[in-house]
Amino acid sequence: MPDYRARRLPNLAGPAAWESILGPRTPLPPLDGTLRADFAIVGGGFAGLSAARRLLQLEPRAKIVLLDAGQIAQGSAGRNSGFMIDLPHELTSEDYAGADAGSDRALIALNRHAIGFAAEAVAEYAIPAGYFRRDGKVNGAASAHADAQNTTYAHHLASIGEAHEILDASAMRELTGSDWYRSGLYTPGTVMIQPAGYIRGLLGGLAPHVTVHENTPVTGLVRLAQGWQVQTLKGRVEAGTVILANNGHLESFGFAERRLMHIFLFACMTAELPPGTRAGHECWGVTPSDPMGTTMRRISAAQGGNRIITRTMAKLLPGMVTTPGQMRHAMAMMREKFDQRFPALKGFAMEYSWAGHLCLTQNNSSIAGRLDQDLFGAGVCNGLGTTRSTLTGIAAAEAALGHDSDATRFFAAQHLPNRLPPAPLAQIGANMFIRWKEWRARRE
Ligand SMILES: Cc1cc2nc3c(=O)[nH]c(=O)nc-3n(C[C@H](O)[C@H](O)[C@H](O)COP(=O)(O)OP(=O)(O)OC[C@H]3O[C@@H](n4cnc5c(N)ncnc54)[C@H](O)[C@@H]3O)c2cc1C
């Protein structure tokens, strides 16, 4: 009987479009047999791959095995909108600002550390420039309320000395080709990634030094006299130390039970736009000024096609699965948001639609540190998965090696994630609250 058993495995609806537009890749074979390693990492998203890279930096001779339940870059790591954001991005706030200036400055420094770590990997592993662009991003505002949220956020950024620029309606039209926005707040520090391209690039760079098995769900962990036996369907890894970097499925193993909010987000991507389509600059990214609004992004051939991506609708799903009805509802909503912004493209084909998983906690705590003897966790991004999960991966690797850093101290000082009220009432209440916030942000 395992000490920790996976009660659920990832089950995400729709294709990971960012992977699909890059073309097929032959997956690495599933684990079949027994391996021995210094470290076993469960999960090959931002957190798991970053943990592997950090372990190698600190212990170049370490034997590392990384297992993913699916194909790497087909999990949520290949399903997001690709904004690697450096600034506070509290999804539960009114305008993304964090608690106070001091904590925002500390968080920005850590976020930039994670982005710098990613940038070094991009250079070292020769990841194509189109997969990691230092473009910055814009918070778009369509209503007077959102415009005011942008102004408040701009004042906050000014107070902490962060660069930003207010764009008027015509600048927004020039950038996006859409008349929808009345203003925007540009900040330069966000890196726009092709998420699957970046993740594949990390995998390619790490693969010569790390043993990776895909389509290998970890089903249980058994404590050994020293370290752990990591069980899979057809094999096992005996490892001195294990890092669980499996996003909300940390809870599936019994960790942080009833403390994680499993949020599912939905997105869609157009078919290739016809040449000459009026859609502004070649590449841009607009997050909503109101965190509950809609994210839009345009990409080019260098990311896999001339396309527009729409992301909207959030759902709290403690069972970690979406239904076909939820997918249809999300698709109808995204269709409407897209058509509002691009009336000339009304009804234009959406080639891909999908759902993905992110984790929030009520008090914004993440998990990056010790879970048990020789067992560490990395995850819970609180809305900033590309950056924060990278950081949790770095910190978990450092903690596993007893290495002291700003990142390990930051996470060690965090409180445990708050306990959530009992389901299902809490789920119903939270989803009603989300719906209301989305309704309020309906123009955004
Ligand atoms: C539509 C959408 C848009 C988003 N946009 C953004 C954005 O623009 N910017 C941003 O920062 N974040 C965004 N996010 C959030 C971001 O994608 C996630 O937070 C991020 O992927 C989390 O990274 P991770 O490495 O912690 O987890 P994941 O990327 O989920 O990786 C965890 C891995 O663990 C594996 N796993 C799970 N259980 C097991 C098991 N038992 N055995 C083996 N492997 C297992 C999974 O297969 C998966 O590959 C978005 C999310 C969605 C869904």
Image: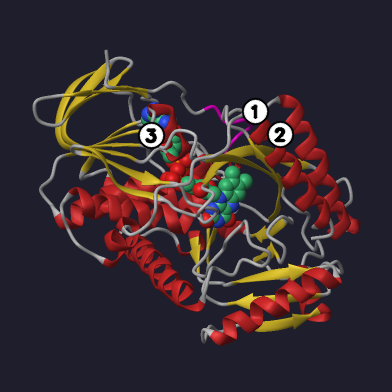
Amino acid carrying mark 1 in the image? Pro
Contact (CB < 8 A) between labels 3 and 2?
A: no
| Total numbered badges shown on the rendered structure | 3
Q: Which mark is residue 364?
A: none
Residue at numbered disc 3: 255
Question: In this picture, is 367 found above or below 71?
Answer: below
**Which residue is label 2 attached to?**
428
Q: Which region of the structure is painted magenta?
A: 11-16
Residue 272 seen in this snapshot = yes
Within 10 angstroms of label 1, few (less than 14), some, or many (20 or more) residues? Answer: few
The majority secondary structure of the magenta stretch comes to loop
Magenta span includes 168: no
Can see residue 72?
Answer: no
Query: Label 1 vs label 3: CA separation?
Result: 20 Å
Q: Quadrant of the N terminus?
A: top left
Amino acid type assigned to the residue bearing label 2 in the image: Ile
Instruction: Answer whether labels 2 and 1 touch (C-beta < 8 Å).
Output: yes
User: Sequence order check: which comes first, mark 1 or mark 3?
Assistant: 3
Query: Residue 424: which disc?
Result: 1
Q: Position of residue 357 (x, y in %)?
A: 56, 40
Looking at the rendered structure, the secondary structure element under dot 1 is loop
Amino acid of disc 3: Phe
* Gap between marks 3 and 2 measured at Cα: 23 Å
The answer to which quarter of the image holds residue 298 is: bottom right
Q: What is the x, y in percent for residue 429?
A: 71, 38
Q: Marks 2 and 1, how far apart in space?
A: 6 Å
Residue 30 position within the rendered picture, expressed as x and y whole percent measured from the top left: 33, 23
Q: Quadrant of the C terminus?
A: bottom right
Q: Is residue 76 above or below residue 252?
A: below
The mark that comes first in sequence, 3 or 2, is 3
Instruction: Verify whether residue 15 appears in magenta.
Output: yes
Q: Nearer the viewer, residue 200 or 411?
A: 411
